[in-house]
Amino acid sequence: MVVVDTFICSDCGYKYTNKAEIFYFNEDFKELEVTLKLTLTLRNLSKSPLYGSAHEKYCPKCNEFIRTYNIYKNTNKKNLSREEINSKINQLSKTRINIVNIKSTSNNNGEKKPSVSSYMKVKKEDEYCPICGEKIYAVYNDMECPKCMKGKLNIQCRVCKIDRR
Ligand SMILES: [Zn+2]
Ligand SMILES: [Zn+2]
């Protein structure tokens, strides 16, 4: 079971799901997966050379969703630089604008095996759009719809439980 917030536009019906996700690269960096599939993910994380948590925010000025990728000391197994990680993510990400954060701490309390739940925490720090510099926010109730720009997004279900597949 995964916990998400779902928003629907009162005008055009646009639907947005806000969720904390996990991302990982496959062994040869040819694929980037951003997923909520927890059971599958654990196995893939142990093989992945680079993984971490991901979350999405919205810039109203650019009208774009921006995804942040958080990488931790112990999840950057090849010790890649921020620039290297940035270019790999930009090549493969479905989101056009991406933010890469490298944390100097490990994210699993010293445990050797990755624990999925430790990557699902949503980051509380302020973030800014890399294009226009505006502060960006997670989608919230009553936000103007990014699709039609007329309606408002209404929370349809706070903390809906969806089945993991
Ligand atoms: Zn912007
Ligand atoms: Zn709309």
Image (cartoon, rainbow, N blue to C red):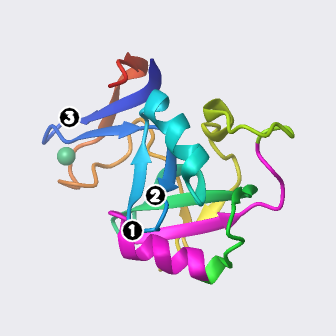
Q: Residue at x 45, y 17 (%)?
A: 1
Q: Residue at x 46, y 23 (%)?
A: 2
Q: Residue 132, can we see it? A: no
Q: Are marks 1 and 2 in contact (CB under 8 Å)?
A: yes
The residue segment tinted magenta is 84-107
Q: Residue 27, can we see it? A: yes
Q: In the depicted view, which residue is nearer to us: 100 or 41?
A: 41
Q: Is residue 75 above or below residue 89?
A: above
Q: Disc 2 marks which amino acid?
A: Asn
**Which dot marks residue 26?**
2
Q: Is residue 67 above or below residue 82?
A: above
**Which dot marks residue 10?**
3
Query: Circle 1 sits on which residue?
Result: 30
Q: Residue at x 21, y 54 (%)?
A: 147
Provide residue 135's location: percent of width, then percent of height: 57, 64
| Element assignment for label 3 | loop
Say which label, 1 or 3, has the lower sequence index. Answer: 3
Q: Is residue 76 above or below residue 19?
A: below
| Element assignment for label 1 | loop
Q: Is residue 95 left or right of residue 114?
A: left
Residue 152: name its quadrant: top left
Classify mark 3 as within 8 Å of ligand 2 or not, answering yes or no. yes
